[in-house]
Image: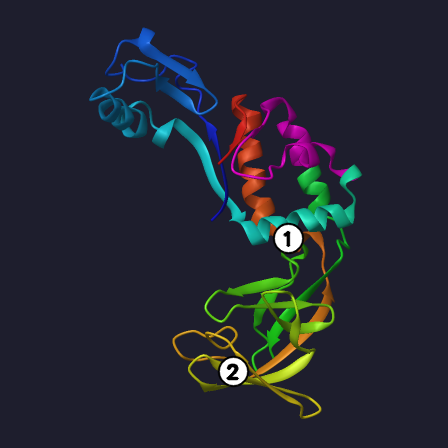
Amino acid sequence: MGLDAFVLCRCWQDGRTTEPPVPRERIMTDDHGPYLDEGFHGALDEVFGKWKAAAACPHGDMEIARERISNWGGYRYLREAMETAGWDRFPVLREYLPESNDGDLPAGRAREALAELAAFRECAAVGTEVVLLDEDTGDVLATSIRAYGGVFVWDGMAKRRVGVDARGLFVVDESGRELFRALRCTQRRVRAGRVRFRTEDGAETTLDLTSTIAERDGAYPRRLRVVERPLDGSFFDYAVEPLRKVCEAAAETGNPVVWC
């Protein structure tokens, strides 16, 4: 799950498509492209859909650009950074970046959005990030996202939530009662569904958890550490770059960026 975006080509608007398989007067259009009007569906839906997807023009689905912006966690992390940097510096992005998979950014605001994206990327300080590390490898295992309260594991079977914030790795139960917290610890599977944490001072806590933290194919990191480190705008290139591509396409075509 995440946020995607696309921009339509101009082939339909400019009359440069192949002949559609249905009468043109029965074709409507909106920001999502041509579609059959009500009462003219049935068997022709599939025929029209195939034409639009692959035969109407050189652009698949009549889109000149389509990008995955980010999963929801990464996208909300970007918004948090923009808020930290100051939304007043990015008024167009603040107005048009969506909260869900709908809406659009008008083509007439695309160049302003591009300038704001460039300015954000040049920000030297957009706050700090709190991350959970595998202390042996330095790999980032989880990042604290404020919109999720730092939680990155929702363990429905064990009825536990695991998260990370500036005060450390934490485990809480369904009611939010804190069961464990530490800035640095080790973890060890005691048996299936049971994990033992040991803090730096030697205190041990054994909890019901479906799996150890960051477990993959039965392997898991043994030593965990929470650190806080500064962030700049370039860190968010994973989302800024696809946003830049769709905004450029909107500016060039005069068609809006459609969120989906």
Image x and y of residue 122, in percent: 73, 48
Which of label 1 and label 2 is nearer to you?
2
- Observer able to see residue 200: yes
Please check the rendered image and state whether residue 106 is part of the magenta-colored stretch, yes or no: yes
Number of the label disc, if any, that sits on residue 77: 1
The residue under the point 70% across, 78% down is 183
Sort mark 1 into few (<14), some (14-19) or many (20+) by Cα contacts within 10 Å: many
In this picture, residue 20 sits left or right of residue 12: left
Q: Quadrant of residue 21?
A: top left
Magenta-highlighted residues:
89-115
Q: Whole-percent x and y of residue 98?
A: 60, 37
> Where does the image place residue 195, in percent across and percent down from the top left?
52, 82
Pick whichever, 123 or 127, lies toward us: 127
Secondary element at tag 1: helix
Q: Is residue 82 above or below residue 60?
A: below
Earlier-in-chain disc, 1 versus 2: 1
Which of the pair 12/37 is nearer the observer?
A: 37
Q: Which residue is mark 2?
A: 195
Q: Which three-letter amino acid code belongs to the residue tagged 2?
A: Val
Which of the two residues, 42 or 243, is positioned nearer the viewer here? 42
Residue occupying image coordinates x 71% and y 91% = 201
Question: Is 96 inside the magenta-drawn segment?
Answer: yes
Name the residue furthest top: 25
Amino acid type, callout 1? Tyr
Whether residues under marks 1 and 2 lie with C-beta atoms below 8 angstroms apart, the answer is no
Identify the residue shown where x is 58% and y is 65%: 174
Residue at image position (54%, 65%) is 153
